[in-house]
């Protein structure tokens, strides 16, 4: 199998060039060229012709091309559908915030977690993405918009911790000084709660923010929308979150999609408050984004307000997610579904 150059660390590229009979610094030249936008081995003007031929026999550069692009007229949010080398497609969203440009990227084509409210999982998992394919979503958006991305959220299609090794490598690559050089503290990783992987992540020494999709105040309700709740109880999940907090010293962010009549009552808020009160955490309320096949309705404005205020009485830091790109259906999974008729 040919080596995927964009999924490699500078050190690995140096080892590759050495193994192909070239000095180490060729590896650095390749690394830097990739981040300047080279997507074809022939385009490396700094490399000798004969070496480029050998390199092409042993390695390739993956690509992501823009298949569709939607630009919000309201807030400048841009949604991309990227086509990968094998024809599969993934979605990414570019958002402008005061604190910087944020890219929401996908980590898998499809997803096998099966959450009832989520558009990305309807057709199951097709395949996981390589580190290069996560990087490309950022690199190609930056190039297309001529803007720099300073923050990343792994909240697009897929379950990042179900593609563990590739995601960890991506995080280390994105942080390379001569690459994108994005600080790990500016990256959020969102998971539906794979307990064993949360424990592994805590040991990686990567100061990213962990977001945990909770979406229910008890196991019974959580099982109704999130199959992962059959594998791990909320108690086990929160124990892993506490271990993560103790190890990393970092605050966890809990995602809670408010679904009208399902998980948005005052009693739900109180139960959630009791669960999370005293934890080093933050709760992010997301009025659910209705998807075609399911009848989930977003909570009423007043219900959101009461829910927020109730949670705050437990001294929990709460925010309601601001909706960006409302006119372009910016939540992940829906554009690809449209395209593939899934
Ligand atoms: N698999 C990861 C990350 C991808 S989803 C996870 O489960 O966290 C990113 C966030 O969007 C998750 O909190 C997910 O539960 C939420 N989400 C998915 N579909 C949604 C919808 N229709 N409305 C609101 N939030 C949704």
Image: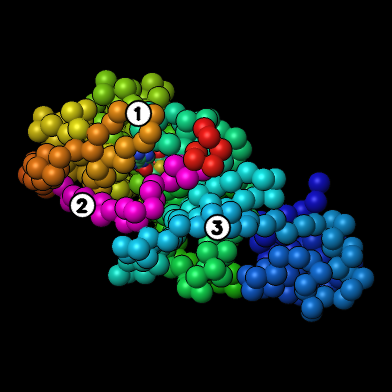
Question: Against 274, is 31 above or below?
Answer: below
Q: Which mark is residue 294?
A: 1
Q: Which mark is residue 137?
A: 3
What x and y, as percent, mark residue 33? 69, 73
Task: Determine whether, in the image, residue 324 is placed left or right of residue 335.
Answer: left
Q: Residue at x 79, y 78 (%)?
A: 45
Report how far apart the C-alphas of labels 2 and 1 lie in the structure: 26 Å
Label 3 crowd bin: few (<14), some (14–19), many (20+), radius 10 Å: many
Q: How is the image coloured?
A: rainbow
Q: Tag 2 or tag 3, which sits nearer the N-term? A: 3
Label 2 crowd bin: few (<14), some (14–19), many (20+), radius 10 Å: few
Q: Residue at x 61, y 38 (%)?
A: 127
Q: Tag 3 or tag 1, which sits nearer the N-term? A: 3
**Residue 114 appearing in the image:** yes
Q: Residue 186's image quarter?
A: bottom left
Report how far apart the C-alphas of labels 1 and 3 lie in the structure: 29 Å
Secondary structure of residue under mark 2: strand
What x and y, as percent, mark residue 90? 55, 47
Task: Determine whether, in the image, residue 28 is placed left or right of residue 311.
Answer: right
Q: Tag 1 or tag 2, which sits nearer the N-term? A: 1
Question: Against 4, is 257 above or below?
Answer: above
What x and y, as percent, mark residue 257? 27, 39
The stretch in magenta equals: 316-336
What x and y, as percent, mark residue 187? 42, 58
Q: Which mark is residue 336?
A: none
Question: Against 174, is 224 above or below?
Answer: above
Ligand 1 contact, mark 1 (Cβ < 8 Å): no
Foreground: disc 1 or disc 3? 1
Q: Do the residues bearing badges 1 and 3 touch, measured as CB atoms within 8 Å?
A: no
Q: Quickly name the residue at label 2.
A: 319
Q: Residue at x 13, y 31 (%)?
A: 265
């Amino acid at each position: 199998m040919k080596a995927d150059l964009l999924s490699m660390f500078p050190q690995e590229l140096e080892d590759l060039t050495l193994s192909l009979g070239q000095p180490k610094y060729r590896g650095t030249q390749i690394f830097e060229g990739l981040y300047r936008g080279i997507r074809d081995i022939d385009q490396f003007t700094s490399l000798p012709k004969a070496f480029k031929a050998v390199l092409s026999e042993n390695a390739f550069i993956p690509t992501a091309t823009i298949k569709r692009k939607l630009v919000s007229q309201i807030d400048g949010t841009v949604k991309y559908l990227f086509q990968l080398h094998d024809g599969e497609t993934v979605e990414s969203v570019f958002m402008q915030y005061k604190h910087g440009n944020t890219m929401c990227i996908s980590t898998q084509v499809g997803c096998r977690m099966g959450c009832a409210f989520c558009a990305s999982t309807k057709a199951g998992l097709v395949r996981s993405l390589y580190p290069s394919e996560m990087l490309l979503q950022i690199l190609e958006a930056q190039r297309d918009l001529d803007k720099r991305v300073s923050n990343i959220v792994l909240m697009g299609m897929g379950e990042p911790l179900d593609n563990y090794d590739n995601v960890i490598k991506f995080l280390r690559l994105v942080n390379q000084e001569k690459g994108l050089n994005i600080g790990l503290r500016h990256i959020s990783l969102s998971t539906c709660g794979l307990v064993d992987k949360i424990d592994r992540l805590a040991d990686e020494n990567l100061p990213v923010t962990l977001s945990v999709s909770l979406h229910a105040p008890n196991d019974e309700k959580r099982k109704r929308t999130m199959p992962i709740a059959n594998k791990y109880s909320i108690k086990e999940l929160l124990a892993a979150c506490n271990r993560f907090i103790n190890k990393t010293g970092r605050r966890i962010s809990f995602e809670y999609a408010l679904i009208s009549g399902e998980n948005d009552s005052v009693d739900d808020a109180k139960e959630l408050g009791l669960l999370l009160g005293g934890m080093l955490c933050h709760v992010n309320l997301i009025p659910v984004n209705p998807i075609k096949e399911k009848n989930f309705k977003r909570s009423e404005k007043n219900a959101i307000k009461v829910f927020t205020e109730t949670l705050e009485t437990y001294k929990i830091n709460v925010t309601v997610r601001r909706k960006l790109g409302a006119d372009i259906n910016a939540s992940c999974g829906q554009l690809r579904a449209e395209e593939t008729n899934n």
